[in-house]
Image: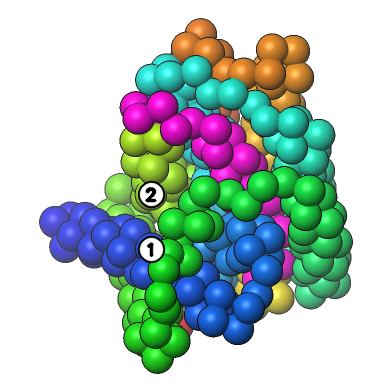
Amino acid sequence: MLLELVAVAAGVAALWWGGDQFVIGAARVASVFRVSPVVVGAVLVGFGTSAPELLVSGVAAARGNMDLGVGNIIGSNLANLTLVLGVAAIIATIPATRASVRREAPLSLGAMVLFAILVQGDLTKVEGAILAVALVVSLGIIMSGARDDRMPEEVGELIGGEVRASRELMRTVVGLVVIVGGAWFLVWGAVLLADRLGLSGGFVGFTLVAIGTSLPELVTAGAAARHGESELVLGNLLGSNLFNSLAVGATIALLGTGDVTDGKLVVFGSIAMVFVAAVMWVFIITDRKLKEIEGIVLLLLWVGTLPFVYSPADEDASPAEPVSQSSTV
């Protein structure tokens, strides 16, 4: 079991470092070509926060383990809204900006509802195309509305001062390569660990893999709350969930080579994801902020979902063993 845990830990570390380098490099390269900061903030930063989920779920789906890929999407969305947002709210009050309440929360909730509906049964290429179209429409709405917002501070910090295009392009490529390698190690270790522990690939994706891919957001959100810079926490997490549901969902639907067979994950996991998103939306609509008590409620909601999605490997019609024997990505 030590080998599997080392592979998972190495994969998470690689995803974390590679994701940072990819976002920084891509944002700076975009600035060289005079791409609007609005586009950088809405697309590149949003994509960057979901890059671990995209690569991990994409690799899992391409190797035939659709349950792990779907479990990672649902589990990451839940982890963002419960573990990450809950911990941040316990540390410090999280304000809800006007953009979060009026634009990002409805779009994020709508994206999760759409994914939850389409994932019932098998994710087909047609459903992947629907998710891709929904992503394009959502990005158009976000960028259109963001033109009236001030440039996010994080985008200014990413772009920085003088930029050397060749160096930042190399940083982007290296970051992407490391993300791909980290995704492969994480999926490989998670599949072997599921076999060893007798758990379904969907449950491992929902818990271990989802928490691993959400660790960067957890650390970043916690640090921002501690330093009194929590304005962007909610918006970033909502944006990440939108990308997870639409971009990552479309990717696994278009690349997937197997069926989604974990019924508990698909039904109860989807219901829990949408329910928690709706609860969070009610919190921010009624009070325009998330306080410590709401953070505790969100954490308890995550714990409460585990018994409903727990699934041993013998209940999964698509065991992980054939995937672990595959040597291709």
Image coordinates of residue 147 in percent, x first then y, are 77, 54
- Which residues are the magenta region? 225-251
Q: Which mark is residue 216?
A: 2
Image-quadrant location for residue 283: top right
Q: CA distance from mark 2 to mark 1?
A: 9 Å
Which residue does the numbered mark 1 point to in the structure image? 20
Judge the density around disc 2: few (<14), some (14-19), many (≥20) Cα neighbours within 10 Å.
many
Q: Is residue 38 visible?
A: yes
- Name the amino acid, label 2: Pro
Which label's residue is closer to the chain start, 2 or 1?
1
Q: Residue at x 38, y 63 (%)?
A: 20
Examine the structure image and report whether residue 229 is included in the region drawn in magenta.
Answer: yes
Q: Residue at x 78, y 48 (%)?
A: 148
Mark 2 or 1, closer to the camera: 1
Direction from residue 219 to residue 83 in the image, left or right: right
Judge the density around disc 1: few (<14), some (14-19), many (≥20) Cα neighbours within 10 Å.
many
Q: Are marks 2 and 1 in contact (CB under 8 Å)?
A: yes
- Looking at the rendered structure, the secondary structure element under dot 1 is helix
Q: Quick one: 58 or 322, which is closer to the camera? A: 58
Q: Is residue 55 above or below residue 194?
A: below
Q: Quick one: 98 or 46, which is closer to the camera? A: 98
- Magenta stretch secondary structure, dominant: helix
- Looking at the rendered structure, the secondary structure element under dot 2 is helix
